[in-house]
Amino acid sequence: YDSAFVTSGTEGEKELYDFLQRLEDVSTYAKTRADTTAQLLSELCKTSKYKILAKIQSELPNLPEDDVILLTDAKSLGNALNQPFRVPLLHRATTK
């Protein structure tokens, strides 16, 4: 999506536009457990076994929870909607 959309200039539209721009400035894509694990493994493949064990021990408690629901097609959407939600549905998450 493009967050720099055109508005007609009314006060309400300008207020909403400014809010969305501020939100865009602080938002980031959600970090999934799978993404974080893959990044960690790619970093570890270049180190010694001792450093791998030490890094895994220190990083495991910091891995994100599996709270991101990945939707890849209509079937995965249907499966997700048929289950009770443990967490809110978010496309992007804010850092502040």
Image (cartoon, rainbow, N blue to C red):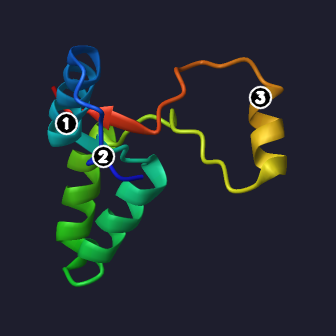
Mark pair 3, 1: CA separation: 30 Å
Residue 45 pos. (x, y %): 30, 81
Lower position in the chain sequence, tag 3 or tag 2: 2
Quadrant for residue 51, please give it.
bottom left
Report the Cα–Cα distance between label 1 and label 2: 7 Å
Q: Which mark is residue 81?
A: 3
Q: What element carries label 2?
A: loop
Question: Distance between the Cα atoms at labels 3 and 2?
Answer: 27 Å
Q: Which residue is drawn at 26% across and 62% down?
A: 53
3 vs 2, front mark: 2
- Mark 3: few, some, or many residues within 10 Å (few <14, many ≥20)? few
Quadrant where the C terminus lies? top left
Q: Which of 38 and 90 is in front in this view?
A: 90
The reply to whether dot 1 and dot 2 touch (C-beta < 8 Å) is yes
* Image coords of residue 16 (percent x, y): 27, 22
- Please give the residue where the numbered disc 1 appears in the rendered image: 21
Give the residue drawn at x 27%, y 39%: 62
- Amino acid type shown at disc 2: Ser
What mark, if any, has residue 52 been given in the picture? none
Q: Earlier in the sequence, mark 1 or mark 2?
A: 2
Q: Nearer the viewer, mark 3 or mark 1?
A: 1
Earlier sequence position, callout 3 versus callout 1: 1
Q: Position of residue 24 (x, y in %)?
A: 23, 40
Q: Which residue is drawn at the image coordinates 32% and 66% (left, top)?
A: 39
Question: Residue 7, position in %: x, y?
Answer: 30, 36
Residue that label 2 marks: 3
Give the amino acid at mark 3.
Answer: Leu
Seen as rendered, the residue at the extreme bottom is 46
